[in-house]
Amino acid sequence: TGSITGGCPFAHGSGETRDLLGRTNRDWWPDSLDLSILTADGRSADPMDPGFDYAEAFNALDYKALKQDLTDLMTDSQPWWPADYGHYGPFFIRMAWHAAGTYRTGDGRGGASSGQQRFAPLNSWPDNGNLDKARRLLWPIKQKYGKHISWADLFILTGNVAIESMGGPTFGYGGGRKDVYEPETVYWGTEAEWVDTGAQTRIDEEGRALESPLAAIQMGLIYVNPEGPGGNPHDAEGMARDMRETFARMAMNDEETVALTAGGHAFGKCHGAQPSDTFGSGPEGESMQHLGFGWLTDPEEIEKGHITTSGIEGAWTPNPTQWGNDYFRLLFKYEYELTESPAGAKQWTPVNPEEADMAPDARDPSKKVPTIMTTADMALKRDPEYRKISERFLNDQAALDDAFARAWFKLCHRDMGPKVRYMGPEVPEETLIWQDPVPAGTQASDDAVSYFKAKVLDSDLTVAELVKAAWASASTYRNSDHRGGANGARIRLAPQKDWAVNDPEELAKVLSTLDGLRGNLSMADAIVLAGAAAIEKAAKDGGHDVSVKVTTGRGDAGEEHTDAESFEPLEPFADAFRNYLKTKADVKTEDMMVDRAHLLGLSIPEMTALIGGMRALGAVSTHAKHGNSIGVLTDRPGTLSNDFFVNLLEMGTVWDVVDESGDEEFVGRCRIHGDEKWRATRTDLVFGSNSQLRAIAESYAETGGEERMVRDFVRAWTKVMDADRFDLR
Ligand code: HEB
């Protein structure tokens, strides 16, 4: 279908260097209270007990009672924000979909899993307009069930209950989204204006690629501009392109996109009853007395239903609180003409609708008003591929039911990682390919493990090769959407096995040797065990007697368990740990190092110890010009030592940039004689140049530092190897 799933999450190709985080909350709201000094020194922002176990709390939840309370809430209209049609269901579906819809495959960030809709910037994104009210409607229920249900879980469960309470199909529910208490730092773009329809800064010149990893067309939108690309309702082709690309960024194909959009818009309405300049700004910038409410509207107007959110006005169907097929029925039954809402938004209205096909007024069911379609909805019949799917759904309600239920489940659970992380009585039995299933493994006996490790050390594989293979296997893990990692040994499968960062030929050799030695061990365990054996040997050669703990029990996934294409966004375009850079990006290479460390869940010392250790081991990717020596600042590669830090900080060396490298490569020469001693990259020298990283490098280079470094290295290494062992927790 020509959809674009990604590319380097940092290369926009603009040629300009940008900040890792783009425009941040501080840029948007310079006046809002800055709490960061209270967390800067490692103090936690989390009010729960240190040992708080959300899984335990969730499992003690009265799930049925909670669902009943949510069902009751749907029709318990509150005077301060009355329910359209007397039912909050549609509003809550939009809340849940916007919570989940920020997910993007490029870096796995965004999504519903930590309840970020409560915090800036998401709480104030224009596209999240008035969802502050939806969250406040839920507060009494959140308060009642307390620690047993997180906000993040509650958002999604409420969406499910909303669908079910209006007769819609659901596929299941998994809890397990633990709340956080501060905004996550996520790159949401660089633009300084919300939904700047004029700029289109995220699309390249051919109008094709959307800046990776972003999944929305403009700053402050969940996906696309409902009025059309850049607000142009006539650009049918561009509308479909924008939808296809943004939904692909969230791992949705055409069928899922159609099912979700049509299924979602079976419910509820758009709000554009008032001129759009009456739509104020989001909660984060509002005055204190509003207690976190934004988009303020006069209570009398609210009561009359005169609300502006998107600016579009009207419902899609005659039965906005009832699941059914009216959406497609109307879409195909009528010609639609371009009209304007009272707020001035471009929208589409059926020509000569029959009375029975008109919608009730949101406050007065005896009054009939025309239905609408947004330009995005129109794409479902104007785009030839979408149209085929829409026509199928028009004529096959059961197919729509199934497709919508499954796509909704995926939307809401895509960022939770493997199924073992789901909790609660409604976890579907069926395993889905996007859950990256891994067949269960078995624990290996101590004898089998030591026999295998001895044979590995006896083979002709080097320490560096073994360490690189284990790192390649485990380091795909992302803390953001809990994908990747060593379990499953997908490193043997496409696309991982062919990634340049993995030195494919060398990797193939290592894997085939390990395969020949492993006996009954899974490949996934064998790869990790071999890395551990290599590190123990390397430490011993350096005079350190350490043991690298490996917990076996990993399984091996096959091609049949793997959606290869969905793994493409996991490719590292830079991996500082192996001193690898595919192409120079728009953010600095050391920024990419920090980003990857963040996705691996590493602290600054853990990142530092790992990099210093892997350099000493010679575990760097094969560099075009310098083989595998770049950054390996030691005369004895393959020995675990603090040589990298010692030599980096050594005053007898002066460093200079290698001109043609575009300041990615440096040469270190003897200060007195000028002869070349080392080659290094930005992610090497940053440990000497950045004052904070230097302080850590010094602590590892000083007397007594090596022993601590080796210990820290082993601990951080094991953390990465076990990052995806949810089965152990
Ligand atoms: Fe939707 C609503 C657009 C998808 C669900 N949306 C809406 C609106 C708009 C839209 C504009 C209105 C808002 C206001 O209030 O004003 N969407 C859209 C677009 C897209 C979408 C453009 C892409 C294509 N949706 C979607 C999905 C879902 C949904 C996917 C789910 C599934 N929505 C929804 C709902 C609603 C909406 C339910 C209603 C809400 C209320 O009623 O409140």
Image (tube, rainbow, N blue to C red):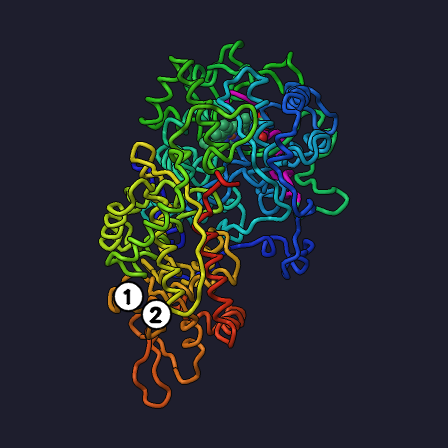
Q: Which residue is mark 1?
A: 628
- The residue where tag 2 is placed is 632
| Of the pair 536 and 512, the residue shown nearer to us | 536
- Residue 492, compared with residue 620, is above or below; it is above
The answer to whether the residues at label 1 and label 2 have Cβ atoms under 8 Å apart is yes
Q: How many marks?
A: 2
Q: Which mark is residue 282?
A: none
Q: Please say if 462 is above or below 345.
A: below
Which amino acid lies under the numbered mark 1 shown in the image of this protein?
Answer: Asn
Secondary element under disc 1, as helix, strand or loop, is loop
Quarter in which the N terminus is drawn: top left
Instruction: Give the residue drawn at x 70%, y 42%.
Output: 292
Residue occupying image coordinates x 70% and y 34%: 146
Picture coordinates of residue 207, whole percent (x, y): 34, 45
Task: Decide whether residue 436 is among the magenta residues.
Answer: no
Quick check: can you spot residue 341? no
Residue 251 in view: yes
What residue is shown at x 43% (from left), y 19% (from top)? 402
266 magenta-colored: yes
**Dominant secondary structure of the magenta stretch?**
loop
Give the residue type at disc 2: Val
Region in magenta: 265-283
- Within 10 Å of the Cα at label 1, are there few (<14), some (14-19), or many (20+) other Cα atoms? some
Q: Say whether mark 2 is within 8 Å of ligand 1.
A: no
Residue 340 horizontal/vertical position (percent) = 52, 29
Q: Is residue 172 left or right of residue 236?
A: right
Please tell me how crowded label 2 is: few (under 14), some (14-19), or many (20+) other residues with Cα within 10 Å. Answer: many
* Foreground pick, 384 / 234: 384
